[in-house]
Amino acid sequence: MKFDRELLKGTTETFILAVVAAQPSHGYQLVKQLKLKSEGIFQLGEGTLYPILYKLETKGWIKGKWDECAGMRRRRVYRITPAGRRQLTARSEQWDELVRGMALLLGGSINA
Amino acid sequence: MKFDRELLKGTTETFILAVVAAQPSHGYQLVKQLKLKSEGIFQLGEGTLYPILYKLETKGWIKGKWDECAGMRRRRVYRITPAGRRQLTARSEQWDELVRGMALLLGGSINA
DNA sequence: GCACATACCTCGTATAACAAAGTATACATC
DNA sequence: GATGTATACTTTGTTATACGAGGTATGTGC
């Protein structure tokens, strides 16, 4: 990962939610999409992603469905729920606030 | 605190470093400055702040000094070190990257 | 003498992100 | 038909962050 891992905490669920909201996906696909869409800034391992997907589903923010076609590895496709969309909105707003707060504090130290 | 606490993880050390860089301060004062300067967005308790100050000092990023004047409660004033300033720069850059990554992913879900 | 703001300190808890290891299927190619 | 690679999902154990709650002690105003 490109960051001190701690910097990511709490943001991970949010951006996973965002990517699932943009397009229903299965886990393995998400690993690649996250990397691609974020231009390599976020790179989750499967051991990080899957547990989060389970958790998001438990909370009712995404809903998984087994996709089994003949001659194809079975995969679990997740899509966002209405509750998940509300979560995403709320978290987006919190994120904006956090960014604003950081700008206020980091800005003040530029020339000190 | 205004946020899901997890959203803050990893950012806390960074903005404390920034505020100390802007102006040498002691712990109790920092609690108030953080709230004030961030326009109420960040509100750390003392139980959160002090352990972080000790850690930052252990790592050599800030340096504390007892300030004892007659007729005055003794207080420990911290100022940033050269190494701390380098840390702050590095973390600032990481933060910008993180913000950029989030913008890429959150932006994509606006109309999905 | 009392309340209150100032100032610092410490312990225990929850849980997030991660690495590592494991299981198993499709497909190419030799 | 054996071998290798990409796909796809699952589980376990570790680390350390932020926090709440509680504790100590000094200066100021009334």
Image: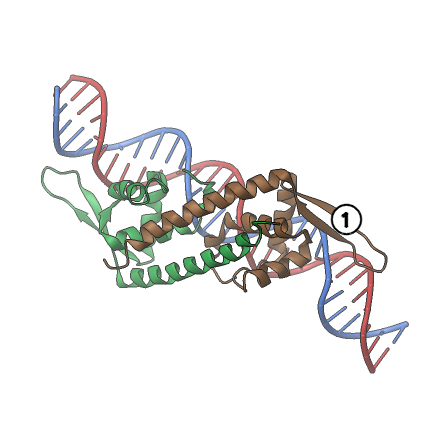
Chain colours: A brown, B green, C red, D blue
- Choose between D17 and C29: the one closer to the eye: C29
Q: Mark 1 — on which chain does it sit?
A: A
Residue B59: x %, y % from top left:
34, 57
Residue A7: x %, y % from top left:
45, 54
Residue C29 is left or right of residue C7, and the answer is right
Residue that badge 1 annotates: A66
On the image, which quarter does residue D26 sit in?
Answer: top left
Residue at image point 68% right, 51% down: A24
Residue D14 is left or right of residue D21, and the answer is right
Residue B11 is left or right of residue B37, and the answer is right
Residue at image point 16% right, 46% down: B67
Residue at image point 65% right, 41% down: A81
Which structural element holds mark 1? strand
Q: Residues within 10 Å of mark 1 (few under 14, many from 20)?
A: few
- Choose between B17 and B72: the one closer to the eye: B17
- Give amino acid for label 1: Trp
Residue at image point 9% right, 40% down: B70
| Relative vertical location of residue A23 with respect to residue A87 in this rendering, above or below | below
